[in-house]
Protein backbone atom coordinates (compact mmCIF):
# COMPACT_ATOMS: atom_id res chain seq x y z
CA UNK A 1 0.00 0.00 0.00
CA UNK A 2 2.81 2.37 0.95
CA UNK A 3 4.58 1.53 -2.31
CA UNK A 4 1.40 2.17 -4.30
CA UNK A 5 0.99 5.55 -2.61
CA UNK A 6 4.58 6.47 -3.44
CA UNK A 7 3.98 5.52 -7.06
CA UNK A 8 0.86 7.62 -7.16
CA UNK A 9 2.66 10.65 -5.73
CA UNK A 10 5.54 10.27 -8.20
CA UNK A 11 3.13 9.81 -11.09
CA UNK A 12 1.11 12.94 -10.30
CA UNK A 13 4.34 14.90 -9.78
CA UNK A 14 5.49 13.84 -13.24
CA UNK A 15 2.13 14.77 -14.75
CA UNK A 16 2.17 18.23 -13.22
CA UNK A 17 5.72 18.86 -14.51
CA UNK A 18 4.64 17.70 -17.96
CA UNK A 19 1.59 19.97 -17.83
CA UNK A 20 3.70 22.91 -16.71
CA UNK A 21 6.01 22.36 -19.71
CA UNK A 22 3.32 21.92 -22.32
CA UNK A 23 1.18 24.84 -21.17
CA UNK A 24 4.15 27.24 -21.28
CA UNK A 25 2.99 30.53 -22.71
CA UNK A 26 4.07 31.64 -26.19
CA UNK A 27 6.34 34.26 -24.72
CA UNK A 28 7.63 33.54 -21.22
CA UNK A 29 10.52 35.99 -21.04
CA UNK A 30 10.42 39.56 -19.91
CA UNK A 31 13.09 42.18 -19.69
CA UNK A 32 14.29 42.37 -16.06
CA UNK A 33 13.02 45.27 -14.06
CA UNK A 34 15.15 47.66 -12.07
CA UNK A 35 13.35 50.02 -9.80
CA UNK A 36 14.39 52.13 -6.87
CA UNK A 37 10.88 53.29 -5.98
CA UNK A 38 9.05 52.59 -2.72
CA UNK A 39 7.98 48.97 -2.22
CA UNK A 40 4.34 49.73 -3.01
CA UNK A 41 5.17 51.62 -6.20
CA UNK A 42 7.73 49.00 -7.03
CA UNK A 43 5.18 46.20 -6.90
CA UNK A 44 2.72 48.22 -8.94
CA UNK A 45 5.25 49.20 -11.62
CA UNK A 46 6.44 45.60 -11.77
CA UNK A 47 2.90 44.45 -12.45
CA UNK A 48 2.53 47.00 -15.23
CA UNK A 49 6.00 46.32 -16.66
CA UNK A 50 5.59 42.56 -16.63
CA UNK A 51 2.38 42.83 -18.56
CA UNK A 52 4.21 44.46 -21.47
CA UNK A 53 5.36 41.78 -23.93
CA UNK A 54 9.09 41.51 -24.61
CA UNK A 55 8.73 42.59 -28.26
CA UNK A 56 7.06 45.85 -27.24
CA UNK A 57 9.74 46.43 -24.61
CA UNK A 58 12.35 45.96 -27.33
CA UNK A 59 10.63 48.46 -29.63
CA UNK A 60 10.50 51.03 -26.83
CA UNK A 61 14.21 50.56 -26.09
CA UNK A 62 15.32 50.43 -29.74
CA UNK A 63 13.63 53.63 -30.91
CA UNK A 64 14.13 56.21 -28.13
CA UNK A 65 13.35 59.12 -30.48
CA UNK A 66 9.86 57.71 -31.08
CA UNK A 67 8.95 57.93 -27.39
CA UNK A 68 6.92 54.74 -27.70
CA UNK A 69 4.72 53.60 -24.88
CA UNK A 70 2.91 50.29 -24.61
CA UNK A 71 0.12 48.42 -22.95
CA UNK A 72 -0.02 44.66 -22.57
CA UNK A 73 -1.62 44.40 -26.01
CA UNK A 74 -0.52 47.37 -28.10
CA UNK A 75 2.20 49.80 -29.07
CA UNK A 76 1.29 53.40 -28.32
CA UNK A 77 2.71 56.12 -30.56
CA UNK A 78 3.59 59.64 -29.50
CA UNK A 79 0.43 61.02 -31.14
CA UNK A 80 -1.74 58.53 -29.25
CA UNK A 81 -2.25 56.11 -32.15
CA UNK A 82 -2.12 52.47 -31.15
CA UNK A 83 -1.00 49.38 -33.03
CA UNK A 84 -2.00 45.90 -31.83
CA UNK A 85 0.84 43.62 -30.78
CA UNK A 86 -0.97 40.40 -31.66
CA UNK A 87 -3.63 39.68 -34.23
CA UNK A 88 -6.02 36.75 -33.98
CA UNK A 89 -4.33 34.49 -36.57
CA UNK A 90 -2.41 31.61 -34.98
CA UNK A 91 0.30 29.43 -36.59
CA UNK A 92 1.01 31.52 -39.70
CA UNK A 93 3.02 29.85 -42.44
CA UNK A 94 5.98 31.58 -44.07
CA UNK A 95 3.95 33.45 -46.72
CA UNK A 96 1.38 34.55 -44.13
CA UNK A 97 4.17 35.85 -41.93
CA UNK A 98 5.58 37.93 -44.79
CA UNK A 99 2.23 39.21 -46.03
CA UNK A 100 0.15 39.52 -42.86
CA UNK A 101 2.43 39.84 -39.84
CA UNK A 102 1.68 41.47 -36.51
CA UNK A 103 4.25 43.24 -34.36
CA UNK A 104 4.92 40.07 -32.40
CA UNK A 105 5.69 38.21 -35.64
CA UNK A 106 8.39 40.78 -36.43
CA UNK A 107 10.46 39.06 -33.76
CA UNK A 108 9.59 35.49 -34.72
CA UNK A 109 12.97 34.73 -36.31
CA UNK A 110 15.83 35.71 -33.99
CA UNK A 111 18.53 37.67 -35.82
CA UNK A 112 21.99 36.12 -35.23
CA UNK A 113 24.05 39.18 -34.29
CA UNK A 114 27.82 39.04 -34.82
CA UNK A 115 30.31 37.47 -37.22
CA UNK A 116 29.72 33.94 -36.01
CA UNK A 117 26.41 32.87 -37.53
CA UNK A 118 25.01 29.75 -39.17
CA UNK A 119 24.30 29.44 -42.91
CA UNK A 120 20.59 30.35 -42.95
CA UNK A 121 18.30 27.33 -42.96
CA UNK A 122 15.29 27.12 -45.28
CA UNK A 123 13.03 30.19 -44.97
CA UNK A 124 15.06 31.61 -42.10
CA UNK A 125 14.91 35.32 -42.97
CA UNK A 126 15.25 37.24 -39.69
CA UNK A 127 14.08 40.79 -40.34
CA UNK A 128 12.05 40.11 -43.49
CA UNK A 129 8.84 39.83 -41.45
CA UNK A 130 7.79 43.48 -41.28
CA UNK A 131 4.56 45.24 -40.36
CA UNK A 132 4.39 47.73 -43.22
CA UNK A 133 2.09 50.07 -41.27
CA UNK A 134 4.74 50.36 -38.55
CA UNK A 135 7.40 51.59 -40.98
CA UNK A 136 5.00 53.83 -42.92
CA UNK A 137 3.95 55.50 -39.67
CA UNK A 138 7.56 55.98 -38.59
CA UNK A 139 9.17 57.15 -41.85
CA UNK A 140 6.26 58.58 -43.87
CA UNK A 141 3.00 57.32 -45.33
CA UNK A 142 3.77 58.31 -48.93
CA UNK A 143 6.77 58.79 -51.17
CA UNK A 144 6.44 62.56 -50.69
CA UNK A 145 6.11 62.27 -46.91
CA UNK A 146 9.25 60.11 -46.71
CA UNK A 147 11.07 62.52 -49.01
CA UNK A 148 10.44 65.41 -46.60
CA UNK A 149 12.58 63.63 -44.01
CA UNK A 150 15.49 62.86 -46.34
CA UNK A 151 18.86 64.58 -46.15
CA UNK A 152 21.95 64.27 -48.31
CA UNK A 153 25.06 62.76 -46.76
CA UNK A 154 28.51 61.90 -48.08
CA UNK A 155 29.19 58.19 -47.76
CA UNK A 156 32.81 57.47 -48.70
CA UNK A 157 32.59 59.63 -51.79
CA UNK A 158 29.01 58.78 -52.78
CA UNK A 159 26.25 61.31 -52.13
CA UNK A 160 23.27 59.52 -50.56
CA UNK A 161 19.71 60.49 -49.65
CA UNK A 162 18.79 59.03 -46.27
CA UNK A 163 16.16 59.74 -43.64
CA UNK A 164 16.95 61.84 -40.60
CA UNK A 165 14.27 59.98 -38.60
CA UNK A 166 15.86 58.03 -35.72
CA UNK A 167 19.10 59.95 -36.55
CA UNK A 168 19.79 57.46 -39.32
CA UNK A 169 21.69 60.13 -41.30
CA UNK A 170 24.09 60.60 -38.38
CA UNK A 171 24.42 56.86 -37.89
CA UNK A 172 25.38 56.33 -41.53
CA UNK A 173 27.94 59.16 -41.35
CA UNK A 174 29.43 57.42 -38.31
CA UNK A 175 29.44 54.06 -40.14
CA UNK A 176 31.26 55.67 -43.11
CA UNK A 177 33.92 57.03 -40.74
CA UNK A 178 34.41 53.59 -39.21
CA UNK A 179 34.59 51.88 -42.60
CA UNK A 180 37.18 54.43 -43.80
CA UNK A 181 39.58 53.08 -41.16
CA UNK A 182 39.86 49.85 -43.20
CA UNK A 183 41.25 50.59 -46.70
CA UNK A 184 40.78 46.92 -47.67
CA UNK A 185 37.01 47.39 -47.35
CA UNK A 186 36.85 50.42 -49.66
CA UNK A 187 35.88 48.60 -52.88
CA UNK A 188 32.83 47.05 -51.19
CA UNK A 189 31.39 50.27 -49.84
CA UNK A 190 32.17 52.75 -52.60
CA UNK A 191 29.80 53.01 -55.60
CA UNK A 192 26.87 52.44 -53.27
CA UNK A 193 24.04 50.60 -55.02
CA UNK A 194 21.28 52.77 -53.58
CA UNK A 195 19.37 54.05 -50.60
CA UNK A 196 15.99 55.76 -51.01
CA UNK A 197 13.78 54.22 -53.68
CA UNK A 198 9.98 54.07 -53.24
CA UNK A 199 9.27 50.66 -54.72
CA UNK A 200 7.83 47.20 -54.16
CA UNK A 201 10.11 44.24 -53.36
CA UNK A 202 10.79 42.38 -56.64
CA UNK A 203 8.14 39.73 -57.22
CA UNK A 204 5.92 40.86 -54.31
CA UNK A 205 3.26 43.39 -53.37
CA UNK A 206 5.17 44.60 -50.32
CA UNK A 207 7.07 47.86 -50.08
CA UNK A 208 10.84 47.52 -49.98
CA UNK A 209 12.49 49.11 -46.94
CA UNK A 210 14.35 51.26 -49.48
CA UNK A 211 11.04 53.16 -49.64
CA UNK A 212 11.70 54.53 -46.15
CA UNK A 213 15.22 55.93 -46.61
CA UNK A 214 16.62 53.73 -43.81
CA UNK A 215 18.20 51.08 -46.02
CA UNK A 216 21.44 51.02 -47.97
CA UNK A 217 22.69 48.66 -50.68
CA UNK A 218 26.50 48.68 -50.82
CA UNK A 219 28.47 47.92 -54.00
CA UNK A 220 26.35 45.59 -56.14
CA UNK A 221 29.47 44.35 -57.95
CA UNK A 222 30.59 42.31 -54.93
CA UNK A 223 27.14 41.26 -53.82
CA UNK A 224 24.95 38.20 -54.13
CA UNK A 225 21.19 38.02 -54.26
CA UNK A 226 19.14 34.83 -54.00
CA UNK A 227 17.07 35.59 -57.09
CA UNK A 228 20.25 35.65 -59.20
CA UNK A 229 20.90 32.09 -58.04
CA UNK A 230 17.45 30.78 -58.94
CA UNK A 231 17.29 30.05 -62.65
CA UNK A 232 13.63 30.76 -63.34
CA UNK A 233 13.62 33.82 -61.02
CA UNK A 234 10.91 32.34 -58.84
CA UNK A 235 11.18 30.15 -55.82
CA UNK A 236 9.50 26.88 -56.68
CA UNK A 237 9.44 25.73 -53.08
CA UNK A 238 11.49 22.63 -53.85
CA UNK A 239 14.98 23.50 -55.05
CA UNK A 240 17.15 24.76 -52.19
CA UNK A 241 18.87 28.09 -52.63
CA UNK A 242 22.65 27.80 -52.40
CA UNK A 243 24.10 30.38 -50.03
CA UNK A 244 26.73 32.78 -51.41
CA UNK A 245 28.53 35.74 -49.87
CA UNK A 246 31.59 37.82 -50.76
CA UNK A 247 31.05 40.72 -48.34
CA UNK A 248 33.70 40.83 -45.55
CA UNK A 249 32.13 40.35 -42.13
CA UNK A 250 33.95 43.38 -40.70
CA UNK A 251 31.50 45.50 -42.72
CA UNK A 252 28.56 43.57 -41.24
CA UNK A 253 29.93 44.07 -37.74
CA UNK A 254 30.25 47.86 -38.17
CA UNK A 255 26.69 48.16 -39.50
CA UNK A 256 25.25 45.96 -36.76
CA UNK A 257 26.99 47.99 -34.05
CA UNK A 258 24.99 50.94 -35.34
CA UNK A 259 21.56 49.32 -35.51
CA UNK A 260 21.54 47.89 -39.05
CA UNK A 261 20.79 44.26 -39.87
CA UNK A 262 22.31 42.52 -42.89
CA UNK A 263 20.48 40.71 -45.70
CA UNK A 264 23.36 38.23 -45.88
CA UNK A 265 21.93 36.42 -42.87
CA UNK A 266 18.78 35.44 -44.75
CA UNK A 267 17.95 32.21 -46.58
CA UNK A 268 16.67 34.59 -49.27
CA UNK A 269 20.01 36.36 -49.08
CA UNK A 270 20.73 39.87 -50.32
CA UNK A 271 24.32 40.56 -49.31
CA UNK A 272 24.43 44.21 -50.39
CA UNK A 273 21.46 45.09 -48.17
CA UNK A 274 21.61 46.75 -44.74
CA UNK A 275 18.47 48.11 -43.05
CA UNK A 276 17.94 49.96 -39.78
CA UNK A 277 16.29 47.47 -37.40
CA UNK A 278 17.72 48.09 -33.95
CA UNK A 279 14.86 46.16 -32.30
CA UNK A 280 16.36 42.94 -33.68
CA UNK A 281 19.83 43.68 -32.29
CA UNK A 282 18.75 44.37 -28.71
CA UNK A 283 19.54 41.50 -26.37
ZN1 LIG B 1 18.45 46.48 -50.54
Image: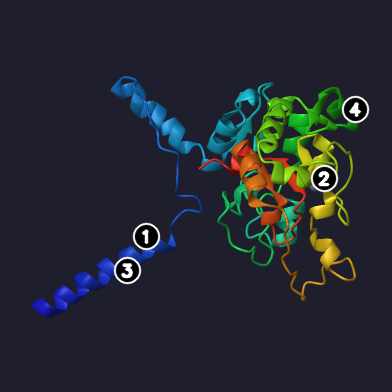
Q: Is 118 or 90 nearer to us in this picture? A: 118
- The part of the image, by quadrant, that contains residue 46 is top left
- How far is the residue under mark 1 from the one under mark 2? 42 Å
Circle 2 residues within 10 Å: few <14, some 14–19, many ≥20: some
Contact between marks 4 and 3 (CB within 8 A): the answer is: no
* Label 4 with label 1: CB-CB less than 8 Å: no
Q: Earlier in the sequence, mark 1 or mark 2?
A: 1
Judging depth in this view, the residue of 225 and 141 nearest the camera is 225
Residue indicated by mark 1: 20
- Cα gap from disc 3 to disc 2, whole angstroms: 49 Å
- Which residue in the structure is indicated by mark 4? 144
Q: Nearer the viewer, mark 4 or mark 1?
A: 4
Question: Tag on residue 208?
Answer: 2
Image x and y of residue 27, in percent = 50, 50
Q: Is residue 172 left or right of residue 22?
A: right
Where does the image place residue 137, in percent across and percent down from the top left?
76, 31
Secondary structure of the residue carrying numbered label 1 = helix
Amino acid sequence: MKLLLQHLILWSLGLSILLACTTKSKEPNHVPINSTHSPLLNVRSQTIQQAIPIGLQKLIAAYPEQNFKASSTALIWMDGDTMPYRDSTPNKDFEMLLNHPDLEDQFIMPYPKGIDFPIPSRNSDPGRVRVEAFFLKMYGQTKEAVRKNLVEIDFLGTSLLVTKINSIDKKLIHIAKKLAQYPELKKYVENVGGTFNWRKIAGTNRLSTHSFGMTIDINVKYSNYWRWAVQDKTEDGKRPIVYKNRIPLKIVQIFEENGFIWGGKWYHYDTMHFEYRPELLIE
